[in-house]
Image (cartoon, rainbow, N blue to C red):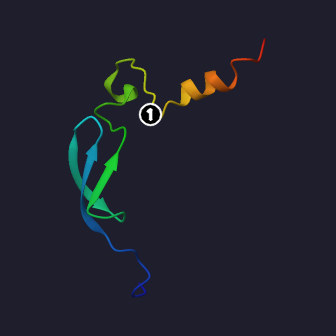
Amino acid sequence: MKDSIHPRAFQARITCACGYESEALSTRGEKVHVEICSHCHPFYTGKQRFVDTAGRIDRFRKKYANVRK
């Protein structure tokens, strides 16, 4: 393999918004923050839960409130 063409890999601590932490190799840095992980995502947990990360549904409803069917 050629030298100096591959990105640096860090031993990263990945922290989720739910509080779960894990360690993995990452090219993004030593500390990585994610919003949803496998411990809180409804697909993996089997629990149906509403996940609205940035008020997207509220913005959608506000944008299309005046549009009639």
In the rendered image, residue 67, in percent from the top left (x then y), is placed at 76, 18
Q: Residue shown at 39%/88% (left/top)?
A: 3
- Give the image location of residue 56, x and y in percent: 54, 31
Residue 42 falls in image quadrant: top left
Residue type at the position of mark 1? Thr
In the image: residue 22, left or right of residue 43: left
The residue drawn where x is 39% and y is 19% is 49
> Viewed as shown, does residue 61 lie left or right of 17?
right
The residue depicted at 31 percent of the width and 69 percent of the height is: 9
Residue 5 on image: x %, y %: 44, 82
In the shown orientation, is residue 63 left or right of residue 36?
Answer: right
Position of 14 relative to 69 (above/below) = below
Count residues near mark 1 (Cα–Cα under 10 Å), then give few for <14, some for 14-19, many for 20+: few
The total of numbered circles placed on residues is 1
Quadrant position of residue 16: top left
Q: Where 33 falls versus 26 (above or below)?
A: above
The residue at the point 22 percent across, 38 percent down is 19
> SS of the residue at dot 1?
loop
Q: Which residue is label 1 attached to?
A: 53
**In which quadrant of the rendered image does the N terminus lie?**
bottom left
Image quarter where the C terminus lies is top right
The residue positioned farthest toward the bottom in the image shown = 3
Q: In this orientation, which residue lies closer to the viewer: 37 or 53?
A: 53
Q: Nearer the viewer, residue 21 or 64?
A: 64
